[in-house]
Image (cartoon, rainbow, N blue to C red):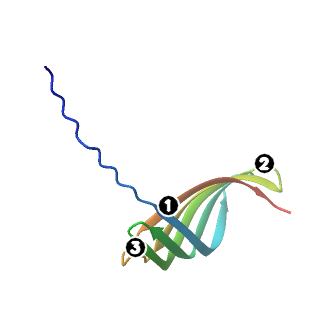
């Protein structure tokens, strides 16, 4: 006879939702005719809703990226941004990575 013991599986369910509004200035550093580096600095306001409580705060937003111009009005862009805001009595960092197409008109 073989005895088996089944241990109960404990599953912890949690949720988190966040959003941010920001204003920043973006600078470009052309390296070639088509390729540029990007840098941004600004301020943000974040709101967090989690299963452990809610928090919000203001803070600094920094970003770096690169841009490749396909034409005078169209460019491919990749950027990494860090939101650093005072929320929950701490200063959690939130990172955002984006890839997109910039269209000028």
The quarter of the image holding the C terminus is bottom right
Mark 3 or mark 2, earlier in chain: 2
Q: Which mark is residue 95?
A: 1
Residue at the spot x=78%, y=48% of the render? 70
- Does 27 sit above or below residue 3? below
Quarter-wise, where is residue 91 in the image?
A: bottom left
Q: Most extreme residue toward the left, as rendered?
A: 1
* Local crowd size for mark 3, using a 10 Å CA cut-off: few (<14), some (14–19), many (≥20): some
Other-residue count near label 2 (Cα within 10 Å), few / some / many at <14 / 14–19 / ≥20 = few
Residue 29 at x, y percent in the picture: 65, 62
Query: Tag 2's secondary structure?
Result: loop
**Distance CA(mark 3)–CA(mark 1):** 13 Å
Q: Are marks 3 and 1 in contact (CB under 8 Å)?
A: no
Residue 5: percent from the left, percent from the top? 18, 34
Residue under numbered circle 3: 91
Alpha carbon of mark 1 to alpha carbon of mark 2: how far? 27 Å
Residue 72 shown left or right of residue 36 in the figure: right
Secondary element under disc 1, as helix, strand or loop, is strand
Query: Is 15 left or right of 41, judged from the image as shown?
Result: left
């Amino acid at each position: 006879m073989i005895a088996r013991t089944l241990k109960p599986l404990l599953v912890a369910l949690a949720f988190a939702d966040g959003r941010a509004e920001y204003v920043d200035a973006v600078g470009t550093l052309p390296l070639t005719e088509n390729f540029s580096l990007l840098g941004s600095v600004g301020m943000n306001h974040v709101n967090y809703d989690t299963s452990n409580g809610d928090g919000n705060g203001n803070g600094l937003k920094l970003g770096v990226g690169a841009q490749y111009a396909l034409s005078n009005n169209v460019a491919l862009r990749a950027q990494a941004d860090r939101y650093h805001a005072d929320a929950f009595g701490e200063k959690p960092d939130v990172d955002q990575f984006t890839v997109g197409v910039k269209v000028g008109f």
